[in-house]
Image (tube, rainbow, N blue to C red):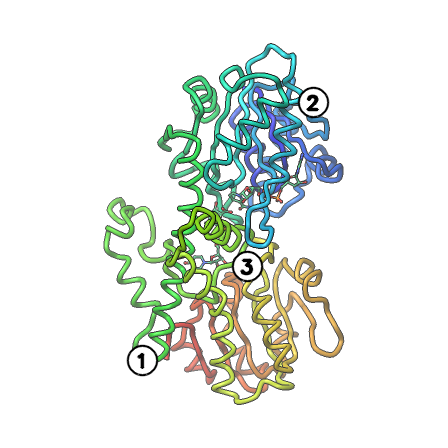
């Protein structure tokens, strides 16, 4: 099929490249010329494992091109998939990029006789597609929805695993205004074997996306609450508790098929809190949507509250140990909001660093790829903040090391290195990826989330 993708960020680019690799003819549209130029030069504008290899194949095979020219693309495709950003504006969803794209597509379709489906892939609050999007499209095109197709196809991929998640989805949700829109969208996914294609109405598709993110975020905050209890009770380890609780196949049906390492792939891992461009923004947007309907949410409100407090609880524990953090050299192992990405949006590292700086600590941040992103938010300054990709340099004569992101390279640092390099070898494991026994055997003071 011929497909236009409007907005070539994380979601749009991955969608475009993966659909091109399945044999579709894809045109990626972005308003940023530099993004378009990079794609056409076969250089991925974002870091995502496996993406650039697929991009090279897609562009060289002629299945993918990028452009800033929306009119030409829409006229040469059967479907337009909108994947522009839906950022938070005072915790409410900002739909201005969606509205602009819909208006532009609708205007191109005016006076044209071809059937074209407009599909929203961006995360939008329920009833956006069948009210705002529908009305704008009808007004701009001077046609009724039905003559033009309308669909909502939420995306569930994770950053750092985007290609794998897109290529092997658990389910494909297609909210459709009518049968013809659904059949057209279904055709796009005909070669995605094994994934059920679920046909729902437009607003149900939107609600499935928010519910999915809110539930996953709530699981994380729930685990962090249990972690807080474990820290206050000697000899209970949250990691053990969560792993063994989730052996129950009611939490993880795949255990039946032995597909995953039980307990390791769920969202019940306690840590420094969730970050990223989506969980915080989407849960807040759902809260705001809910309040707008006159319902005061309680569980998801608590999800955000716990998440805000979680990084600060780490600092409190350090203060209990060291009394004062003033002048202490503290190494932050991991700046990205999770491994395999250079994305630091809403990373717990930001809250941790800012709080430590307020208390007069000296920060040495370590990350394999996210340093440049972090410098834009918390710049280096000779006195109190510096960054390096090399943990050896950072750990030299440090007072404390806090593991914030579970990059595999940090888990691979030998415990002896902490003892040898640091002034006082105190390690706070914010992701529970280090081996407590091995650290203690090496003479390191080990502290872990969810462990007294
Ligand atoms: N990042 C993620 O892992 C996931 C994001 N989502 C949702 O997908 C949507 C997109 O998110 P990201 O890809 O992360 O955003 P992003 O910010 O990385 O990319 C958006 C792109 O759209 C472009 N754009 C904006 N307006 C445009 C217009 N009128 N014409 C052409 N291009 C335009 C921007 O230049 C930018 O490159 C959001 O609603 C997000 O919540 C959903 C699942 C996963
Ligand atoms: O809508 C979105 O944008 C996406 O949001 C999340 O994906 P993402 O933010 O890329 O990353 P996750 O792997 O889900 O991690 C989010 C945060 O939760 C934290 N986390 C995750 C899992 C866990 O058990 N514990 C935990 O603290 C991570 O460290 C990270 O900070 C969802 O997992 C995707 O399904 C969804 O499509």
How far across and how far down the image is residue 126, in percent?
46, 39
Asked whether the beta carbons under mark 1 and mark 3 sit within 8 Å of each other, the answer is no
Mark toward the start of the polypeptide (1 vs 2): 2
Q: Which quadrant of the figure shows ligand 1?
A: top right
Q: Residue at x 29, y 50 (%)?
A: 252
Number of other residues with Cα within 10 Å of mark 2, as a class: few under 14, some 14 to 19, many 20 or more: some
| Nearest to viewer (mark 3 / mark 2) | 2
Assign the C terminus to one quadrant of the image.
bottom left
Mark toward the start of the polypeptide (1 vs 3): 1
Pointer 1: what residue? Answer: 233
Q: Nearer the viewer, residue 357 or 54?
A: 357
Question: Does residue 133 appear to the left or right of 307 in the view shown?
Answer: right
How far across and how far down the image is residue 149, in percent?
51, 20
Mark 1 and mark 3: Cα distance apart in space: 29 Å
- Up-down relation of residue 229 to residue 373 (above or below): below
**Residue 141 image-quadrant placement:** top right
Mark 2 residue CB less than 8 A from any atom of ligand 1: no
Mark 3 and mark 2: Cα distance apart in space: 37 Å
Asked whether the beta carbons under mark 3 and mark 2 sit within 8 Å of each other, the answer is no
How far across and how far down the image is residue 191, in percent?
44, 25
Q: Nearer the viewer, residue 370 or 85?
A: 85
Disc 1 secondary structure class: loop
Number of other residues with Cα within 10 Å of mark 3, as a class: few under 14, some 14 to 19, many 20 or more: many
- Up-down relation of residue 207 to residue 438 (above or below): above
Pointer 2: what residue? Answer: 71
Q: Residue at x 65, y 29 (%)?
A: 59
Assign the N terminus to one quadrant of the image.
top right
Disc 3 secondary structure class: loop
Pointer 3: what residue? Answer: 337
């Amino acid at each position: 099929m011929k497909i236009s993708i409007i907005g070539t960020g994380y979601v749009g680019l991955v969608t475009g490249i993966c659909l091109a690799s399945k044999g579709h003819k894809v045109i990626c549209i972005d308003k940023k010329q530099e993004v378009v130029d990079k794609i056409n030069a076969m250089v991925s504008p974002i870091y995502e494992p496996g993406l650039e290899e697929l991009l090279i194949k897609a562009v060289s095979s002629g299945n993918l091109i990028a452009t800033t020219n929306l009119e030409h693309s829409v006229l040469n495709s059967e479907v337009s998939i909108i994947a522009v950003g839906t950022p938070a504006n005072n915790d409410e969803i900002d739909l201005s990029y969606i509205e602009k794209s819909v208006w532009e597509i609708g205007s191109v379709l005016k006076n044209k006789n071809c059937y074209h489906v407009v599909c929203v892939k961006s995360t939008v609050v329920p009833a956006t597609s069948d009210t705002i999007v529908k009305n704008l499209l009808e007004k701009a095109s001077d046609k009724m929805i039905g003559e033009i197709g309308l669909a909502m196809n939420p995306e569930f991929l994770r950053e750092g695993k985007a290609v794998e998640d897109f290529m092997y989805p658990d389910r494909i949700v297609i909210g459709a205004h009518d049968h013809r829109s659904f059949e057209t969208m279904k055709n796009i996914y005909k070669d995605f074997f094994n994934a059920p294609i679920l046909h729902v109405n437009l607003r149900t598709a939107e609600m499935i996306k928010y519910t999915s993110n809110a539930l996953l975020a709530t699981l994380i905050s729930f685990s962090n609450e249990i972690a807080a209890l474990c820290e206050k009770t000697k000899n209970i380890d949250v990691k053990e508790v969560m792993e063994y609780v989730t052996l129950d196949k009611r939490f993880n049906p795949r255990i039946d098929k032995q597909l995953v390492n039980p307990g390791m792939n769920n969202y019940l891992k306690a840590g420094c809190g969730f970050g990223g461009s989506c969980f915080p923004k989407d849960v807040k947007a759902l809260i705001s949507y809910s309040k707008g309907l006159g319902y005061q949410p309680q569980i998801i409100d608590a999800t955000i509250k716990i998440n805000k407090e979680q990084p600060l609880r780490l600092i409190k524990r350090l203060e209990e140990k060291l009394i004062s953090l003033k002048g202490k050299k503290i190494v932050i192992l991991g700046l990205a909001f999770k491994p395999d990405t250079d994305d630091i949006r809403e990373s717990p590292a930001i809250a941790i660093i800012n709080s430590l700086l307020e208390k007069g600590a000296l920060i040495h941040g370590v990350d394999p790829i996210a340093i440049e992103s972090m410098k834009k938010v918390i710049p280096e300054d000779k006195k109190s903040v510096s960054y390096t990709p090399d943990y050896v340099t950072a750990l030299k004569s440090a007072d404390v090391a806090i593991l914030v992101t579970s990059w595999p390279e940090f888990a691979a640092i030998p415990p002896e290195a902490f003892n040898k390099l640091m002034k006082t070898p105190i390690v706070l494991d914010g992701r529970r990826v280090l081996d407590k026994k091995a650290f203690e055997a090496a003479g390191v003071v080990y502290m872990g989330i969810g462990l007294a």
